[in-house]
Amino acid sequence: MQEYEKLGVFYLGQLYDLDEKERLDPLLLYDSRDLVTHAVCVGMTGSGKTGLCVGLIEEAALDGIPAIVIDPKGDLGNLLLTFPELRPSDFRPWINEEDAGRKGKTPDEYAAARCRF
């Protein structure tokens, strides 16, 4: 099992060298035990707030951690438009078939497992 696939470890991406314009080897992982009951994310337009929040919310959902999200602009709520029914077939086009194979599942089974909400 990869380090970032453990329960309680949030995978947020990789470190990035702005000067060299390249990704660095270390993964950016977040320990869910460091979560607090309230948070706010602020920053300039285009600074990556929505991307960070989407990553945190997705990782929390995968670990069964509930979230109440207040998003005045509606960026996060628009993500539900892609999967209005949260059906396994809705997720199927975005399933990595190699990931499914590593888990010993067909892509359809893996899609069903990913939408366990």
Image (cartoon, rainbow, N blue to C red):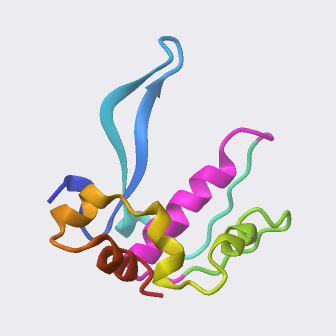
Q: Nearer the viewer, residue 99 or 76?
A: 99
Q: Is residue 83 left or right of residue 62?
A: right
Q: Is residue 79 above or below residue 109?
A: above
Q: Nearer the viewer, residue 31 or 22?
A: 22
Quadrant where the N terminus is found in the figure: bottom left
Q: Position of residue 72 (x, y in %)?
A: 85, 67
Q: Is residue 85 above or below residue 13?
A: below
Q: Is residue 46 magenta?
A: yes
Q: Residue furthest top?
A: 20
The residue shown at (17%, 62%) is 102
Magenta stretch secondary structure, dominant: helix
Q: Is residue 55 above or below residue 66?
A: above
Q: Position of residue 52 (x, y in %)?
A: 58, 52
Q: Is residue 95 magenta?
A: no
What's the magenta region? 44-66
Image quarter for residue 95? bottom left
